[in-house]
Each structure stands twice: as structure tokens, then as C-alpha cells.
Amino acid sequence: MAHTFEELVEKQRAADQAHAAVQTLRTKGDPPAYETAWQVWRDLAQDVQSAVTVHAKEQGAVRAGVELEVKKAVRYIE
């Protein structure tokens, strides 16, 4: 499935938010909640990686470059 750059950015934002939830739960002492959050983060991160790979292939771009641009768009808002 083709993904636009904006869709990749949204997927990365969701994965980053899920990661933040995992980090928060790590110190809360609630193993079931932590495990659930970790699985959600893992699945979202895997989805991002797959989508970036497909997008890069379709665009004839270097995969690592696409991933870097997506992460910059999410994490370094000007």
C-alpha cells in the first residue's frame, strides 16, 4: 500500500507517543499495563518501518534517508 510522506509522519508520531507511554509505565510498577503498552509500541514501530520501506522503494529513494526525514519532521518542528 502506498503511503504519502504525511502518512509516514503521522505513523511515526503515533509510535513516538506509544513509546512515551511505555517509558512512563516502566516506572509505575504495573507489569500488565507495561506489557500491553510495549506491544502497542512495537506494532506501531514495525508498521512505520514497513511503510517507510515501501515508500522509499516506490519513490526510488534511499530508505535510511526517508526514515531520517520522517523522524526530523516529527521531532524537530520549527
Image: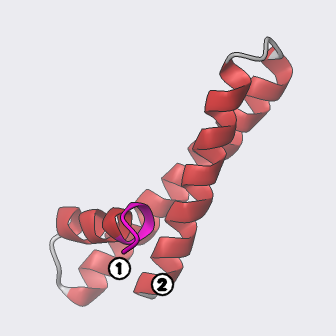
Q: Judging from the image, what secondary structure is the residue with disc 1 in?
A: helix
Nearer to the camera, 3 or 30: 30
Left or right of 61, for residue 78 = right
Q: Amino acid at mark 1?
A: His
Q: Which residue is mark 1?
A: 55
In the rendered image, is residue 3 in sight?
no
Q: Amino acid at mark 2?
A: Glu
Which residue is rendered at x = 67% and y = 20% of the image?
26
Q: Is residue 77 magenta?
A: yes
* Earlier-in-chain disc, 1 versus 2: 2
Query: Residue 67: percent from the left, percent from the top?
Result: 30, 64
Query: Residue 59: percent from the left, percent from the top?
Result: 25, 88
Q: Are marks 1 and 2 in contact (CB under 8 Å)?
A: no
Which residue is rendered at x = 73% and y = 26% of the image?
25
Relative to 67, say whether 58 is above or below. Answer: below
Mark number, residue 4: none
Nearer to the camera, 58 or 31: 31
Q: CA distance from mark 1 to mark 2?
A: 11 Å
Viewer-nearest of discs 1 and 2: 2
When asked about the image quadrant of residue 57, the answer is bottom left
Question: What is the quadrant of the C terminus in the image?
Answer: bottom left
Q: Which residue is mark 2?
A: 6
